[in-house]
Image: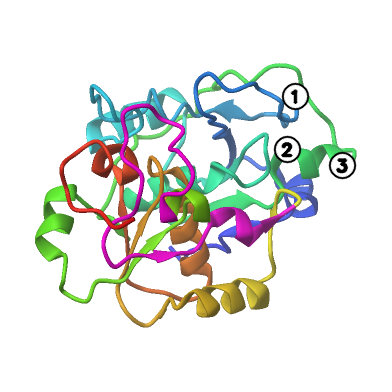
């Protein structure tokens, strides 16, 4: 089964979202305690994918990648099959939907895309909006079975052991947090960065809730000093925009990208070395 274009626009989805193999998922997530000021409503037929609920339980890291059993159970509950084309969106634009894309990719699901502009772009285009999420309508077929992952994760233990090995670590956090001049939004975390890392703020790759075009993405990636031909490890605050960087690098042709899932929520709370 050939992979699909990882980025789709609203016109494409509008013409296809009633097809039997299309599954639309809302992957909206935002920091607890922050106001929900994002676009309201639901794309017709969409279901909500809670990245904190469909996650490996952890006392402090709330949305670590689930194991295969937990992911497959979520897919069965939402009646998603490996052959379906999953389209991910969020109510902010493309803030957290790439994290959902990356999760599906980790379990070998090839037909998965991000809706560029998300719900705000859908609303702006005057397409239909529902008030509530769709209930799963069961189809006949076997249960979801994940296959081998197409990308990977790296643990803090592996990353600490590899420091000094000419790693290419790319941090998606804003510059102030990367350089340690702005406090971390999560309490109890040190300020700074993983030694030797590169800063490529995810917010600079997005304009008005949509990704910049490929040429602009390539330019910003190059100016940051990222070499797409070399292995890349992405990181951020809690693993969400790190997956967004993985999405961008995938679109630009990078073939060896791993996400540090614990990101600064784990590193900044530990005694691992930092730069400020």
> From mark 3 to mark 1, how far is it between C-alphas?
12 Å
The answer to whether residue 97 is visible is: yes
60 up-or-down from 68: above or below: above
Residue sticking out furthest to the right = 126
Please, what is the dominant secondary structure of the magenta stretch? loop
Instruction: Please name whichever residue, 201 or 108, is drawn nearer the observer in this view of the structure.
Output: 201
Q: Residue at x 52, y 80 (%)?
A: 222
Q: Which mark is residue 124?
A: 3
Residue found 50% across the figure and 51% down from its top: 176
Circle number at residue 41? 1
Residue at 27% x, 51% y is 147
Q: Tell me if label 3 and label 2 are in contact, CB under 8 Å.
A: no
What's the CA distance linking mark 2 and mark 1?
8 Å
Q: Earlier in the sequence, mark 3 or mark 2?
A: 2
- What residue appears at the point 68 percent right and 43 percent down from the top-left corner? 93
Secondary structure at badge 1 equals loop
Q: Is residue 104 magenta?
A: no
């Amino acid at each position: 089964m050939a992979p699909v274009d990882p980025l789709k626009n609203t016109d494409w989805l509008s013409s296809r979202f009633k097809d039997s193999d299309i599954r639309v998922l809302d992957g909206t997530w935002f920091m607890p305690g922050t106001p929900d000021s994002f676009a309201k409503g639901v794309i017709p037929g969409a279901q909500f994918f809670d990245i904190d609920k469909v996650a490996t339980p952890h006392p402090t890291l709330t949305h670590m990648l689930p194991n295969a059993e937990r992911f497959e159970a979520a897919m069965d509950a939402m009646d998603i099959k490996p052959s379906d084309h999953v389209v991910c969106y969020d109510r902010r634009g493309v803030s957290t939907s790439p994290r959902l894309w990356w999760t599906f990719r980790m379990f070998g699901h090839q037909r998965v895309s991000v809706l560029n502009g998300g719900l705000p772009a859908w609303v702006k285009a005057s397409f239909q909006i529902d008030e509530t999420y769709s209930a799963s309508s069961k189809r006949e077929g076997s249960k979801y079975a994940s296959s081998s992952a197409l990308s990977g994760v790296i643990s803090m233990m592996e990353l600490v052991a590899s420091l000094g090995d000419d790693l290419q670590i790319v941090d998606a956090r804003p510059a102030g947090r990367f350089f340690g001049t702005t406090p971390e939004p999560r309490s109890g975390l040190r300020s700074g960065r993983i030694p030797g890392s590169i800063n490529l703020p995810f917010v600079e790759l997005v304009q008005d809730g949509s990704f910049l075009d490929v040429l602009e993405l390539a330019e910003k990636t190059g100016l940051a000093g990222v070499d797409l031909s070399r292995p890349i490890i992405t990181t951020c605050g809690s693993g969400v925009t790190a997956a967004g960087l993985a999405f961008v690098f995938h679109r630009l042709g990078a073939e060896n990208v791993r996400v540090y899932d614990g990101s600064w929520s784990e590193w900044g709370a530990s005694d691992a070395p930092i730069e400020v």
